Image (cartoon, helix red, strand yellow):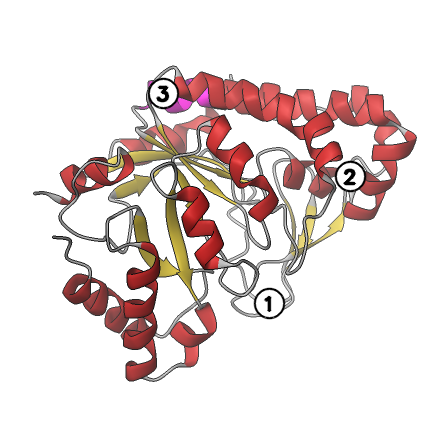
């Protein structure tokens, strides 16, 4: 069974032959998806770099290996929303890279990206504290902002389909270490209706949806399943009850991640291999699991090789 055949058996709850350590995809994204600008400045720039991305958010890179932080939010005054110019995806300067990278897939599945789907995009534009206040003082304006962000995402979705994407990576970080960033009533009122628009679009086209949300996300599991999430990552081990998550997700949702990143970063070979085996025993003996770190860090290459080797050796099914 090829890697791609095994992947589709996995996500359809068929009969995969092995637990993978990755999705077999080649990533394609519009220019600006990762807060870069047209001059090439981004989170990979040297420490001390200050740049303004294509959305008008100004970032500062403060620590090596860590993404920058917003230092200027163009919609801090949300009453100026009508004057704000969203990136125009009819302009090929935003989308040319997406199509170029899609053409380089070379036997892998093409995956498109909706980084910062609504919530994160909104607080980068407005500021986290400002947005939290506006939820109560200007709820109609917040809904209008979310609607316009989703209008952009749906325009991007059309390009993703045209480029041949079979997997869509999207996400919003909705959890802290111990709770959601908002109550369920707030989520259901402001975010859920917009999420439904884009999930319905992709479900209609049988695209695999890989949704990213850091932190404690257990209260949202049923919502993710109902929306049509196929793969949920990173299933942060330090913030969620993995046994409970597995029981609720089994047969409904593929879990990706759950291997504590601190162990992969600084653990011994024995510790890494032991943790991989425990995670596969808990989450993936019957499939339904992609075994990888629960955060994206600059891991020591040898530690990643140890993880991949152990997944390959221990992750055979049947």
| The quadrant where residue 27 appears | top left
Q: What residue is drawn where x is 43% and y is 68%? A: 298
Mark sitting on residue 253? none
Q: Is residue 4 left or right of residue 279?
A: left
The residue lying toward the viewer, choosing from 201 and 238, is 238
Q: Is residue 88 visible?
A: no
Check the image and name the residue furthest to the right. Answer: 137
Residue segment shown in magenta = 156-163
Dot 3: element = helix
> How would you classify the magenta stretch by its main secondary structure?
helix
Residue at position x 25%, y 73% in the image = 306
The residue wearing badge 3 is 161
Look at discs 1 and 2 and give the one toward the viewer: 2
Above or below 72: residue 86: above
Q: Is residue 48 left or right of residue 80?
A: left
Of marks 1 and 2, which one's residue comes earlier in the chain? 1
The quadrant where residue 315 appears: bottom left
- Whether residue 52 is situated above or below residue 88 in the rendered picture: below
Q: Which one is in front in this view, the residue at disc 3 or the one at disc 1?
A: 3
Say whether residue 44 is left or right of residue 271. right
The percent position of residue 303, horizontal first and vertical second, equals 31, 75
User: For mark 1, what is the residue?
Assistant: 47
Helix, strand or loop status at disc 2: helix
Q: Compare marks 3 and 2 and give the one earlier in the sequence.
A: 2
Instruction: Tell me which label, 3 or 1, sits earlier in the chain.
Output: 1
Circle 1 sits in a helix, a strand or a loop, which is it?
Answer: loop
Q: Position of residue 255 (x, y in %)?
A: 38, 48
Q: Which mark is residue 126?
A: 2
């Amino acid at each position: 069974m090829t890697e791609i055949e095994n992947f589709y058996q996995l996500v359809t709850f068929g009969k995969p032959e092995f637990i993978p350590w990755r999705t077999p995809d080649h990533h394609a994204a519009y220019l600006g998806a990762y807060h870069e600008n047209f001059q090439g400045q981004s989170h990979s720039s040297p420490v001390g770099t200050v740049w303004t991305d294509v959305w008008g958010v100004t970032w500062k890179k403060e620590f090596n290996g860590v993404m920058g932080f917003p230092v200027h939010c163009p919609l801090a005054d949300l009453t100026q929303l009508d004057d704000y110019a969203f990136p125009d995806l009819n302009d090929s300067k935003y989308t040319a890279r997406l199509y170029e990278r899609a053409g380089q897939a070379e036997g892998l599945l093409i995956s498109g990206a909706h980084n910062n789907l609504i919530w994160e995009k909104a607080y980068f534009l407005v500021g986290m504290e400002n947005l939290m206040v506006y939820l109560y003082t200007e709820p109609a304006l917040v809904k209008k902002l979310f609607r316009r962000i989703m209008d952009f995402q749906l325009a991007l979705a059309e390009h993703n389909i045209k480029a041949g994407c079979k997997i869509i990576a999207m996400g919003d970080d909705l959890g802290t270490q111990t709770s959601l960033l908002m109550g369920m009533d707030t989520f259901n009122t402001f975010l859920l209706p917009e999420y439904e628009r884009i999930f319905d679009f992709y479900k209609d086209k049988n695209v695999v949806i890989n949704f990213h949300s850091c932190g404690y996300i257990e209260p949202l599991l049923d919502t993710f399943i109902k929306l049509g999430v196929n793969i949920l990552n990173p299933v942060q081990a330090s913030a969620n009850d993995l046994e409970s998550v597995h029981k609720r997700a089994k047969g409904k949702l593929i879990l990706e991640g759950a291997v504590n990143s601190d162990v992969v970063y600084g653990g011994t070979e024995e510790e890494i291999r032991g943790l991989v085996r425990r995670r596969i025993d808990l989450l993936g003996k019957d499939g339904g699991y992609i075994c990888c770190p629960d955060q994206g860090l600059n891991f020591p290459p040898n530690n990643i090789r140890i993880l991949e080797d152990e997944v390959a050796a221990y992750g055979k099914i049947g």
